[in-house]
């Protein structure tokens, strides 16, 4: 599959005339609770040749490949990515912290990654994760059984928010790192470990009987965290993002030959 992903990325570069500067795994595989039938969620950041950016025309800034049962691949243009980074876009920040990187042009990504740490907005990120947790918790209502992934989505996003409040930084992507920090032992930890094991040995749609004890924990954590959301600092000036855009475009040049595969 890694070879297939590398070939897909090469094909995108050639067909779209772009340079992929970063590609990673997103979703359940990167979060640490994939099922046997989980697909691969590949996300990437790309750049066009410099002249592409010297136009007032509105141009498409996303690339989406038709989804199949195994692969879900899409990416964002570097200018779009930097605009979202200034808003501390959580999905983008998760891409940058993914434990599975398929492609990385170091000269281009270094400045982008350094800027992401400065641009992090804790209030915005907390709202993102709490909104995701709220959506997952809402799915519990009026159901006797619940998808395991709904429980795991809820607990992971709450732990992400807890990390942000405690560390004032982007949380790690893998749920195991969050559990180690905030749920090292205890009945809730044991229950979450069981959920991860069951999902890993089953399919994406696997369901279990609802747990009132676990849901009480989730609801209690949600209320507690919602009352502790920190305030955002002032946003970094847009000129710093412009500078990184120029630096990246200069670092990769005007030509976009396919990069060597990491695999």
Image (spheres, rainbow, N blue to C red):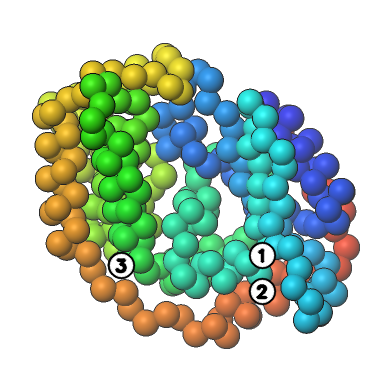
Residue 131 appears anywhere in the view = yes
Pointer 2 or 3: first along the chain: 3
The reply to whether callout 2 and callout 1 are in contact (CB within 8 Å) is yes
* Residue 17 screen position, x and y as percent: 85, 56
Q: In which quadrant is the C terminus drawn?
A: top right
Residue 156 appears anywhere in the view = no
Is residue 95 toward the left or the right of residue 162 in the image? Answer: right
The reply to whether callout 2 and callout 3 are in contact (CB within 8 Å) is no
Q: Residue at x 20, y 30 (%)?
A: 189
Label 3 neighbour load within 10 Å: few <14, some 14-19, many 20+ = some
Q: Residue at x 47, y 62 (%)?
A: 89
Q: Secondary structure at mark 2?
A: helix
**Residue lying farthest front?**
142
Q: Identify residue for label 3.
A: 123
Is residue 72 toward the left or the right of residue 13 in the image? Answer: left
* Residue 228 screen position, x and y as percent: 17, 63
Mark number, residue 107: none
Q: Identify residue for label 2.
A: 245
Q: Against 183, is 117 above or below?
A: below
Pointer 3 or 1: first along the chain: 1
Q: Against 146, is 128 above or below?
A: below
Q: Against 89, is 247 above or below?
A: below
Q: Secondary structure at mark 3?
A: helix
Label 2 neighbour load within 10 Å: few <14, some 14-19, many 20+ = many
In front: label 2 or label 1: 1
Q: Identify residue for label 1.
A: 78
Q: Nearer the viewer, residue 263 or 232?
A: 232
* Residue 236 screen position, x and y as percent: 46, 81
Q: In which quadrant is the N terminus drawn?
A: top right
Q: Nearer the viewer, residue 142 or 172?
A: 142
Q: Residue at x 28, y 48 (%)?
A: 134
Q: Residue at x 35, y 48 (%)?
A: 132
């Amino acid at each position: 599959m890694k070879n297939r992903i590398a070939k897909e990325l090469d094909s995108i570069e050639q067909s779209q005339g772009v340079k992929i500067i970063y590609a990673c795994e997103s979703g359940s595989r990167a979060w640490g609770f994939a099922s046997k039938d989980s697909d691969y969620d590949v996300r990437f950041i790309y750049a066009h040749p410099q002249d592409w950016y010297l136009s007032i025309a509105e141009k498409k800034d996303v690339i989406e490949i038709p989804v199949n049962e195994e692969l879900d691949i899409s990416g964002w243009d570097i200018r779009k990515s930097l605009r979202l980074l200034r808003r501390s876009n959580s999905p983008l920040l998760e891409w940058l912290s993914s434990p599975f990187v398929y492609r990385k042009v170091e000269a281009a990504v270094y400045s982008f990654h350094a800027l992401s740490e400065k641009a992090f907005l804790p209030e915005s990120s907390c709202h993102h994760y709490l909104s995701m947790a709220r959506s997952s918790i809402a799915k519990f209502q009026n159901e006797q059984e619940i998808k395991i992934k709904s429980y795991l989505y809820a607990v992971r996003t709450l732990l992400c928010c807890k990390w942000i409040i405690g560390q004032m930084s982007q949380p790690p992507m893998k749920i195991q790192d969050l559990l180690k920090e905030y749920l090292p032992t205890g009945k809730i930890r044991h229950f979450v470990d069981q959920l991860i094991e069951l999902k890993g040995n089953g399919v994406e749609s696997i369901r279990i009987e609802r747990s009132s004890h676990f849901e009480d924990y989730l609801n209690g954590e949600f209320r507690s965290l919602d009352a502790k959301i920190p305030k955002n600092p002032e946003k970094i000036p847009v000129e710093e993002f412009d500078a990184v855009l120029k630096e990246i475009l200069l670092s990769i040049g005007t030509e976009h030959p396919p990069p060597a595969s990491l695999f």
